[in-house]
Image (cartoon, helix red, strand yellow):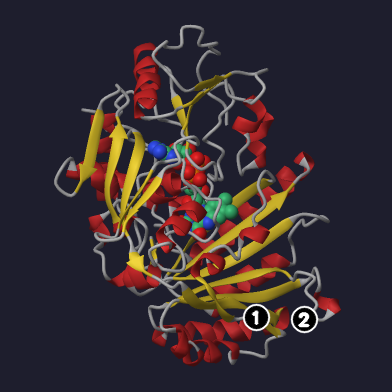
Amino acid sequence: MSASTEPRTHSDFPADFRGTILRPGDDEYDTARALYQGRAADEGPALIARCSDEDDVAAVLRYASAHNVPVAVRGGGHGSDGYAMPGGALVVDLSGMRSVTVDPQTRVVRAQPGVKLGEMDAAAQEHGLAVPAGTVSSTGVAGLTLGGGIGYLMRRYGATVDNLLACDMITVDGRKVRADATENPELFWALRGGGGNFGVVTSLEYRAHPVGPEVVAGKLIFPIDQAAEVLGKLAVHGATAPRELGLLVAIADAPPLPMLPEDVHGKPVLILVVVYTGEPDTADEVVRPLAELGRPLADLVGRTTWVQANSMLDAVAPYGMRMNLRGGYLPALTDDAVDVLLEHVATLPANPGDIYSINISFMGGAISEDVDEDATAFSRAGAAWLWEAICKWDAPESDASYDQWATTLTEAMQPHALTNGYANLSDDLGEEWRRGVHGSEAKHQRLRAVKAAFDPQNLLRFNKNIAPATSD
Ligand SMILES: Cc1cc2nc3c(=O)[nH]c(=O)nc-3n(C[C@H](O)[C@H](O)[C@H](O)COP(=O)(O)OP(=O)(O)OC[C@H]3O[C@@H](n4cnc5c(N)ncnc54)[C@H](O)[C@@H]3O)c2cc1C
């Protein structure tokens, strides 16, 4: 993604900015512009303004507004579109704003926008608490929260946005505003799912919940030829599962583990990633029926800590590879939808060293039943499962074949999927997709109105962009 404006050197960058300014050729520039999405490294931004506090953020945004310069925002750097570091752009880099505080009395966790999920988890667990968020510890809290936030605790406590109490934000003209249920409530609604469209968020406050420290978690690994049978039974079994069960199903290549037969190493298998946060002594009655959905090659589920459980996917999420990401909501896990996913495993371009995972996340419970669809910009109406395909490779020559594969899969899944979705777990698929992803035309227009109120010039356009409402 490239900045659409004339190249600027920003030689007039404001003197009241006290953070670090990085331009092409500076020592730390290449390290600073590296994102999870390796394709973003193809072109570098014009200037990275690494902010030390909210006054720095305000200084950059006042400068951008005065010169009508669009601004990109880097939180944790995990966005799949690479919008955090567009070629030629001015970037507000929040990666240095890393403080996280926990009040054990009120159970309120306050995080700055450079904080990563693993850091928030570690801080909250010192008090036996956790904020419902995502499953890979290097993901940033800011981008994840502003898009919605799903993970192993969503069935028990809801999406991350359902546990967001307040945000502090700098507007594009440099004002500090707070958004919560009573102050700027319309902005607060939009920030809970509308992404980085409205301003730069400098602080996020969450309601945390008692979790762990001991949980029961791990992987149940089945041969791929049992996948259709296991998923068919899981679709039925899911209806009776307790909210304390977090479950992600992955179709991926088997790791070379000694407990797996050698002939499946590097070949597709079905993995049930299980995280049970209820009373550990009751886990067996929840986990055993999952193992009995088929005949597992390995049962790696056992007692562990919440922090370990919530980072077990880190090993398959290396930073900096080229990638694409597609996904959507399923109203039901039907045999036909499962067939489409399984058929596409066989057509993956996969070269040695490439990584793929086709995931199916189990929704239901608090995220689906406890919050009204219109309460947040994040949409979840009708979603029982979420499918997601993530491919990673190093060779630029593989871009076209992986993108073609992902497009074909997305089209084949369309008849089985809902038109709303989770914006963070798909690449930006264009205007029509962005119109539908929040769930209804009314919600889309409501987001456009908030955008017009807070960013009428669309300076924050390097994102899943919501066009400002026009007065006509
Ligand atoms: C390996 C991997 C695992 C993932 N797992 C999960 C998961 O389990 N659950 C889940 O819900 N999602 C998951 N995601 C998706 C994740 O939520 C999004 O990629 C999210 O955008 C990451 O946020 P970030 O701050 O790290 O990324 P960034 O790339 O820094 O930010 C993404 C976008 O968010 C906006 N933004 C970021 N910070 C701010 C801010 N402070 N103010 C205003 N706008 C801002 C900007 O528009 C920016 O372009 C995963 C992604 C990856 C790559």
Quarter residue 41 falls in: top right
| Mark 1 CB within 8 Å of ligand 1 | no
* Disc ID at residue 50: none
Seen in the picture, residue 286 relative to 186 is either above or below; the reply is below
189 left or right of 51 in image? left
Image location (x, y in percent) of residue 357: 65, 63
Screen quadrant of the C terminus: top left
Seen in the picture, residue 381 relative to 395 is either above or below; the reply is below
Q: Is residue 428 visible?
A: no
- The residue identified by callout 1 is 300
Screen quadrant of the N terminus: top right
Structural crowding at the residue carrying mark 1, measured as other residues with C-alpha within 10 Å and reported as few (<14), some (14–19) or many (≥20): some
41 left or right of 77 in image? right
Structural crowding at the residue carrying mark 2, measured as other residues with C-alpha within 10 Å and reported as few (<14), some (14–19) or many (≥20): few
**Residue drawn where x is 36% and y is 73% of the image:** 156
At mark 2, the secondary structure is loop
The three-letter amino acid code for the residue at tag 2 is: Met
- The residue identified by callout 2 is 259
Q: Residue furthest right?
A: 263
**Residue in front for this viewpoint, 43 or 47:** 47
Q: Are the residues at dot 1 and dot 2 in contact (C-beta closer than 8 Å)?
A: yes
Image location (x, y in percent) of residue 62: 34, 18
**Residue drawn where x is 55% and y is 84% of the image:** 232
Q: How many marks?
A: 2
Seen in the picture, residue 386 relative to 4 is either above or below; the reply is below
**Residue in front for this viewpoint, 26 or 106:** 106
323 left or right of 244 in image? right
Q: Is residue 203 visible?
A: yes
- Earlier in the chain: of badge 1 and badge 2, it is 2
Image location (x, y in percent) of residue 34: 63, 35
Image location (x, y in percent) of residue 176: 26, 29
